[in-house]
Image (tube, helix red, strand yellow):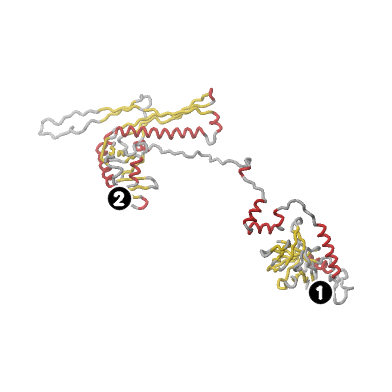
Amino acid sequence: MLSRSSNDIVADDERNVIVVQLAEYGDVREVSDDGITRYRETFQSMKMADRVAAKDAHGGAIIGHADVQSFRDKPNPTVDLHIADTTAGRDLMALVRNGTVDSVSVEFVPSDKDAETDGVLVRNDSLISGVAFAFRPAHQAPILATREDNTPQTKETNMADTATPDIAADAVTREELAAVRDELTREMVNFRTIDTGPVNPLAKYRSKGELYHAIVHGTPDEIEHLNRALSDQILTANDGVNRLQYVDQIKGIVDFGRPLINAFGVDAWQTGQGNTVEWPITGVDDGLVGVQAVEKTEVTSKTWIVTNATATIKTYAGASDVSWQIIKNSSPSYLDALLAAYYRDYAAKTDAGASTELMAAAVPGPVWNPTTGTADELRVALFEASLAVETATGSPASFVLAGSGAYLKMGGLAGLWPYPYGTQNVSGTADAGSLMVNVSGLPVKHCRHLGDTEIVVSNSQTAKWREISPMVVTAENVALAGRDVGIFGMGILTPFVPSGIVEIVPGT
């Protein structure tokens, strides 16, 4: 919001009404909004806001309001100001009556119709939001006249005693107006300076409002010019405040666990009894019992032999020499992360070892081709294999182990439907959301360390993973300012009943 001064005022003392001229249309004046930048300006048209305050000065007290209905635009804009009967209002009326204050200054909002012509900013449809009384106006807007007050006046405030009957006592004469004009002209000339330096590109914007308007509504060329006028402050040029962000957690960690070992279960290795485990295997039960021919004849008698099976435990270990510096100063802890990595790789290596030992002990069973086999054919093969497991252990199969290629083929079989969508009368389910496959009631476990097309059907009675649990071992290496850190464990798969470990043969 900008302000401009005028010095045309008429005071109605009886009703405390002052009639003011807001500006003189076409009158060109040199003005300044910030006290530094000066430019030429004239008004062509004005309009009043819904409510317009009257003030004793810019930023001063509100002493009344403008009667918007009394606004007259031609030939020059005038309006009636109703002054309140307050201390500030009475003081202002006294100053107007004796001629001390003879002008007003308008507070207005520029419009988008403003245009520059021959170096003069022409204001059109300026919205008047306030009128303040001023001692030295920027624009020609004098007090027009004051009306006679019918109420008794004191000698101090009544200046009409020597006035002619047809002229108000506090009216401003033409000679006084001319003197004020001449004084103002001299002051404006004294403020003029000659600037021989380079012109600032922003000097053409005469107010903050015009600068903001150019930024929002300007052409691409104007906006580009404004951007060039500002210094670039960018983060990459300020290394002192360009701090790196660190995520205090190591990413990319993948832990598949030991699905094959977990399927059979783990038994603790009895320490202090060597590196070899031995277990007895029952003899063949068939033929031990028969039908007696007649009384007192020989009954069936057959030798029943219990044999032994053995397995030698294997050692799984790894170690590193870690400096004290990285142990003390790393964040997140390098040592903790290293030990976690050792445990993950121990799980992978022992599961791979168990997979190799399992396939060496497995017996061939029914045939199913992962490339061309159907879901119904797989269901038949698994049922046959489960029956073989029951024959060997007395209990049916409880799981299926599959290598990556075979597992992928099973998951994509037509006839295996995702469980969340409801399944009826199907061979099984395959759900990509959980990577769970179930065929003919048997859960299929993905074992990455089995061969690509290898499939095994069994239960937890047929084998166990016997293990000395992995442990962390450390020793300070003082000479090298470090610490030897490692992991040590031992384990072996013990296939107690090989005939219950049934392989689905990937035949043609």
Q: Residue furthest right?
A: 162
Q: In which quarter of the view is residue 120 placed?
A: bottom right
Q: Is residue 410 left or right of residue 238?
A: left
The quarter of the rendered structure image containing the C terminus is top left
Residue 257 screen position, x and y as percent: 40, 37
Q: Residues within 10 Å of mark 2 (few under 14, many from 20)?
A: some
Task: Tell me, yes or no, if residue 394 can be seen here.
Answer: no
Q: Percent position (x, y) of residue 231? A: 66, 48
| SS state under label 2 | loop
Amino acid type, callout 1: Arg
Q: Nearer the viewer, residue 255 or 405?
A: 405
Label 1 to label 2: alpha-carbon separation: 105 Å
Q: How many marks?
A: 2
Figure check: 191 above or below 10: above
Q: Look at the picture and state if 122 lies above or below 422.
A: below
| Disc 2: which residue | 426
**Residue at point 44%, 33% (across, down):** 343
Q: Amino acid at mark 2?
A: Val
Q: Position of residue 208 (x, y in %)?
A: 69, 57
The N terminus: image quadrant: bottom right
The reply to whether residue 31 is in sight is yes
Q: Residues within 10 Å of mark 1 (few under 14, many from 20)?
A: many
Query: Residue 145 falls in which quadrant of the image?
Result: bottom right
Describe the element under mark 1 as helix, strand or loop. strand
Rendered location of residue 169, percent (x, y): 86, 72
Please name the residue shown 52% across and 34% down the image: 333
- The part of the image, by quadrant, that contains residue 312 is top left
Q: Nearer the viewer, residue 146 or 187?
A: 187
Label 1 or label 2, whichever comes before in sequence order: 1
Q: Looking at the picture, tell me which residue is in the foreground, 70 or 481.
A: 70
The mark found on residue 147 in the picture is: 1
